[in-house]
Image: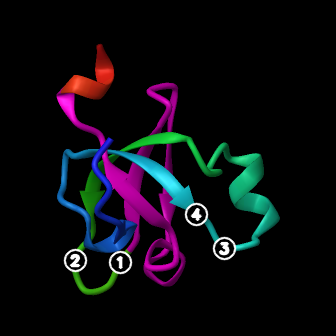
Amino acid sequence: MNSQTINLYGAKKKGTFYVKSVPDVGLLKSLGLRAGSEVKLQHRYAFGGPVLLSVGGEYQIAIGKDIAKQIAVGEVDDDDRL
């Protein structure tokens, strides 16, 4: 896996990432966002809006900008999928 850490809000669209750390917000854990989860950034809405994520390829959720900036992720390389 790529060792570079970025925040989720700054991640590239349509990229697939693994979650390195999340803020201590219970709702995020119940939505499946925890360290080690795989997410795909589907869309980043304009003017500081939320980001739309696919979590584990199972469902989509929207996360606000302020929370997304606190979620540390690393990019998944194609080699990691083998």
Quadrant assignment for the N terminus = top left
In the rendered view, would you say 77 is above or below 78? below
Residue receiving disc 1:
49
At 74% from the left and 52% from the top, the residue drawn is 29
The picture places residue 68, in percent across and down from the top left corner, at 46, 72
Q: How far apart, in angstroms, are the residues tagged by discs 1 and 4?
A: 21 Å
34 to the left or right of 79? right
Nearer to me, 42 or 11 = 11
Q: Which residue is mark 3?
A: 23
The label shown at residue 46 is: 2
Badge 2 or badge 4: first in the primary sequence: 4
Between label 2 and label 4, give the one nearer the viewer: 4
* Real-space CA distance between mark 3 and mark 4, rounded to the nearest whole angstrom: 7 Å
Amino acid type, mark 3: Pro
The crowding category of the residue bearing disc 3, from other C-alpha atoms within 10 Å (few below 14, some 14 to 19, many at least 20), is some
Q: Are marks 1 and 3 in contact (CB under 8 Å)?
A: no
Badge nearest the viewer, 3 or 4: 4
**Residue type, numbered disc 2:** Ala
Where 48 falls versus 35 (above or below)?
below
Q: Residue furthest top?
A: 82
Helix, strand or loop under label 3: loop
Residue 60, image x, y percentages: 48, 41
Magenta span of residues: 50-78
Q: Nearer the viewer, residue 12 or 64?
A: 12
- Please tell me whether mark 2 sits on a helix, a strand or a loop: loop
**Which residue appears at 18% of the width and 54% of the height?**
13
The colour scheme used here is rainbow
Pointer 1 and pointer 4: residues touching (CB < 8 Å)?
no
Q: Are marks 1 and 2 in contact (CB under 8 Å)?
A: yes
